Image (cartoon, grey):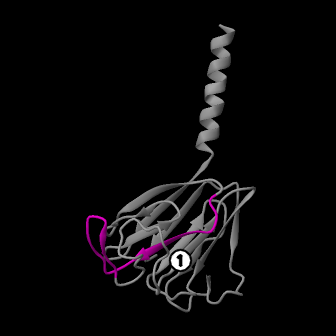
Amino acid sequence: MATSSSALILLLAVSFAAGASATSFSITNQCSFTVWPAARPVGGGRQLNSGETWNLDIPAGTSTATIWGRTGCTFNGNSGRCATGDCNGVLACTLSGQPPLTLAEFTLGGEFDSYDISVIDGFNIGMGFSCSTGVALQCRDSRCPDAYQQPNDVKTKTCRGNRSFRIVFCP
Protein backbone atom coordinates (compact mmCIF):
# COMPACT_ATOMS: atom_id res chain seq x y z
CA MET A 1 0.00 0.00 0.00
CA ALA A 2 2.80 2.43 0.91
CA THR A 3 4.56 1.60 -2.36
CA SER A 4 1.50 2.41 -4.48
CA SER A 5 0.93 5.67 -2.56
CA SER A 6 4.55 6.67 -3.13
CA ALA A 7 4.26 5.81 -6.81
CA LEU A 8 1.08 7.91 -7.11
CA ILE A 9 2.72 10.89 -5.42
CA LEU A 10 5.75 10.55 -7.70
CA LEU A 11 3.50 10.33 -10.79
CA LEU A 12 1.58 13.46 -9.74
CA ALA A 13 4.82 15.36 -9.08
CA VAL A 14 6.24 14.41 -12.49
CA SER A 15 2.97 15.38 -14.21
CA PHE A 16 2.93 18.75 -12.46
CA ALA A 17 6.56 19.44 -13.38
CA ALA A 18 5.95 18.46 -17.02
CA GLY A 19 2.95 20.81 -17.23
CA ALA A 20 4.99 23.65 -15.74
CA SER A 21 7.73 23.25 -18.36
CA ALA A 22 5.75 24.84 -21.20
CA THR A 23 4.21 28.26 -21.71
CA SER A 24 0.98 28.52 -23.67
CA PHE A 25 0.52 31.06 -26.44
CA SER A 26 -2.95 31.86 -27.72
CA ILE A 27 -2.65 33.48 -31.17
CA THR A 28 -5.91 34.97 -32.48
CA ASN A 29 -6.70 36.51 -35.86
CA GLN A 30 -9.18 39.38 -35.47
CA CYS A 31 -8.38 40.73 -38.95
CA SER A 32 -10.96 40.62 -41.73
CA PHE A 33 -8.44 38.61 -43.81
CA THR A 34 -6.38 35.44 -43.41
CA VAL A 35 -3.08 35.73 -41.53
CA TRP A 36 -0.35 33.10 -41.70
CA PRO A 37 1.40 33.27 -38.30
CA ALA A 38 4.94 31.96 -38.03
CA ALA A 39 6.87 31.04 -34.89
CA ARG A 40 10.54 30.30 -34.43
CA PRO A 41 12.50 28.52 -33.14
CA VAL A 42 9.45 26.35 -32.31
CA GLY A 43 5.99 26.24 -33.78
CA GLY A 44 6.63 26.65 -37.48
CA GLY A 45 3.59 28.24 -39.09
CA ARG A 46 0.04 27.77 -40.30
CA GLN A 47 -3.00 29.38 -41.88
CA LEU A 48 -5.24 31.32 -39.47
CA ASN A 49 -8.55 32.45 -40.94
CA SER A 50 -10.42 35.45 -39.56
CA GLY A 51 -11.77 34.64 -36.08
CA GLU A 52 -9.59 31.55 -35.56
CA THR A 53 -7.12 30.91 -32.72
CA TRP A 54 -3.92 28.84 -32.76
CA ASN A 55 -2.85 27.47 -29.36
CA LEU A 56 0.85 26.79 -29.16
CA ASP A 57 2.97 25.45 -26.27
CA ILE A 58 6.52 26.80 -26.14
CA PRO A 59 9.10 24.98 -23.94
CA ALA A 60 10.51 26.76 -20.88
CA GLY A 61 14.01 28.10 -21.48
CA THR A 62 13.23 29.16 -25.06
CA SER A 63 15.18 32.34 -25.76
CA THR A 64 15.26 34.87 -28.54
CA ALA A 65 12.02 33.56 -30.01
CA THR A 66 9.66 35.37 -32.35
CA ILE A 67 6.10 35.14 -33.64
CA TRP A 68 4.87 37.25 -36.56
CA GLY A 69 1.99 37.41 -38.97
CA ARG A 70 2.47 36.87 -42.69
CA THR A 71 0.01 38.34 -45.17
CA GLY A 72 -0.90 37.81 -48.80
CA CYS A 73 0.18 34.16 -48.77
CA THR A 74 -0.48 31.31 -51.15
CA PHE A 75 0.71 27.80 -50.29
CA ASN A 76 0.59 24.42 -51.94
CA GLY A 77 1.48 22.02 -49.15
CA ASN A 78 4.51 23.41 -47.32
CA SER A 79 5.77 25.64 -50.13
CA GLY A 80 4.50 28.99 -51.34
CA ARG A 81 5.03 32.72 -50.96
CA CYS A 82 3.85 35.61 -48.77
CA ALA A 83 3.66 39.31 -49.65
CA THR A 84 4.91 40.23 -46.13
CA GLY A 85 6.88 38.24 -43.56
CA ASP A 86 7.81 35.47 -46.00
CA CYS A 87 10.32 32.94 -44.63
CA ASN A 88 12.02 31.51 -47.70
CA GLY A 89 8.75 30.29 -49.22
CA VAL A 90 7.88 27.67 -46.58
CA LEU A 91 4.77 27.30 -44.42
CA ALA A 92 6.61 26.00 -41.32
CA CYS A 93 9.28 28.66 -40.80
CA THR A 94 12.76 27.78 -39.59
CA LEU A 95 14.22 31.14 -40.68
CA SER A 96 13.22 34.68 -39.79
CA GLY A 97 10.66 36.39 -41.97
CA GLN A 98 11.55 39.00 -44.58
CA PRO A 99 10.67 42.64 -43.84
CA PRO A 100 8.33 44.26 -43.40
CA LEU A 101 7.09 42.36 -40.36
CA THR A 102 5.70 43.23 -36.94
CA LEU A 103 7.45 40.93 -34.44
CA ALA A 104 6.39 39.57 -31.06
CA GLU A 105 9.72 38.77 -29.34
CA PHE A 106 10.13 36.78 -26.13
CA THR A 107 12.44 34.82 -23.85
CA LEU A 108 11.02 32.24 -21.42
CA GLY A 109 12.53 30.89 -18.24
CA GLY A 110 13.93 31.73 -14.87
CA GLU A 111 11.91 33.85 -12.48
CA PHE A 112 10.75 36.22 -15.22
CA ASP A 113 9.68 35.88 -18.85
CA SER A 114 10.42 38.90 -21.07
CA TYR A 115 8.47 40.09 -24.11
CA ASP A 116 8.15 43.00 -26.53
CA ILE A 117 6.86 44.08 -29.94
CA SER A 118 9.33 45.25 -32.58
CA VAL A 119 8.77 47.22 -35.79
CA ILE A 120 12.51 47.71 -36.40
CA ASP A 121 12.13 45.55 -39.54
CA GLY A 122 8.98 47.41 -40.61
CA PHE A 123 5.27 47.16 -39.85
CA ASN A 124 2.96 44.80 -41.70
CA ILE A 125 0.03 44.04 -39.37
CA GLY A 126 -1.49 45.35 -36.14
CA MET A 127 -0.63 43.27 -33.08
CA GLY A 128 -1.52 43.02 -29.41
CA PHE A 129 0.85 41.08 -27.12
CA SER A 130 0.21 40.38 -23.44
CA CYS A 131 0.92 37.94 -20.67
CA SER A 132 -1.30 36.89 -17.81
CA THR A 133 0.73 38.83 -15.21
CA GLY A 134 2.12 41.80 -17.15
CA VAL A 135 1.46 44.86 -19.26
CA ALA A 136 -0.58 44.55 -22.48
CA LEU A 137 1.21 45.96 -25.54
CA GLN A 138 -0.63 47.16 -28.66
CA CYS A 139 0.70 48.18 -32.01
CA ARG A 140 -1.85 49.37 -34.58
CA ASP A 141 0.47 51.23 -36.97
CA SER A 142 4.16 51.85 -37.71
CA ARG A 143 4.38 54.72 -35.18
CA CYS A 144 3.43 52.39 -32.35
CA PRO A 145 4.64 53.77 -29.00
CA ASP A 146 4.65 50.27 -27.40
CA ALA A 147 7.11 48.86 -29.97
CA TYR A 148 10.84 48.98 -30.52
CA GLN A 149 11.41 51.47 -33.34
CA GLN A 150 15.21 51.19 -33.18
CA PRO A 151 17.61 48.83 -31.39
CA ASN A 152 18.38 51.14 -28.45
CA ASP A 153 14.72 51.66 -27.45
CA VAL A 154 13.82 50.22 -24.05
CA LYS A 155 10.43 48.59 -24.55
CA THR A 156 10.90 45.08 -23.09
CA LYS A 157 8.37 44.06 -20.42
CA THR A 158 8.53 41.19 -17.93
CA CYS A 159 6.10 38.72 -16.41
CA ARG A 160 6.65 36.91 -13.15
CA GLY A 161 5.72 33.25 -13.02
CA ASN A 162 3.82 33.54 -16.28
CA ARG A 163 2.57 30.53 -18.16
CA SER A 164 0.20 32.19 -20.61
CA PHE A 165 0.67 34.72 -23.42
CA ARG A 166 -1.83 36.13 -25.88
CA ILE A 167 -1.11 37.53 -29.34
CA VAL A 168 -3.91 39.18 -31.31
CA PHE A 169 -3.59 40.24 -34.95
CA CYS A 170 -5.65 43.39 -35.70
CA PRO A 171 -6.49 44.16 -32.05
Residue type indicated by callout 1: Leu
Q: Secondary structure at mark 1?
A: strand
Task: List x then y, in percent, for residue 77.
Answer: 26, 64
Q: Residue at x 50, y 81 (%)?
A: 102
Identify whether 78 is placed above or below 18.
below
User: Quick one: which residue is furthest to the left in this view?
Assistant: 76
Q: Nearer the viewer, residue 130 or 149?
A: 149
Farthest residue to the top: give it. Answer: 1
Residue at 50% over, 75% down: 96
Instruction: From the image, tell me which residue sits under label 1.
Output: 103
Residue 28 image position (x, y, % from top left): 42, 66
Q: Can you give x and y, in whole percent of width and height, for residue 110 in the image?
A: 74, 56
Quarter-of-image position of residue 4:
top right
Identify which residue is drawn at 44% across, 63% down.
44
Q: Which residues are drawn in magenta?
A: 62-82
Residue 80 magenta-highlighted: yes
Q: Nearer the viewer, residue 108 or 86?
A: 86
Q: Quadrant of residue 8?
A: top right
Q: Is residue 87 left or right of residue 57?
A: left
Q: Position of residue 74 (x, y in %)?
A: 26, 75
Can residue 28 be found in the magenta stretch? Answer: no
Q: Quadrant of the N terminus?
A: top right
In the picture, residue 125 is in which quadrant? bottom left
Residue found at the very far bottom of the displayed protein: 143
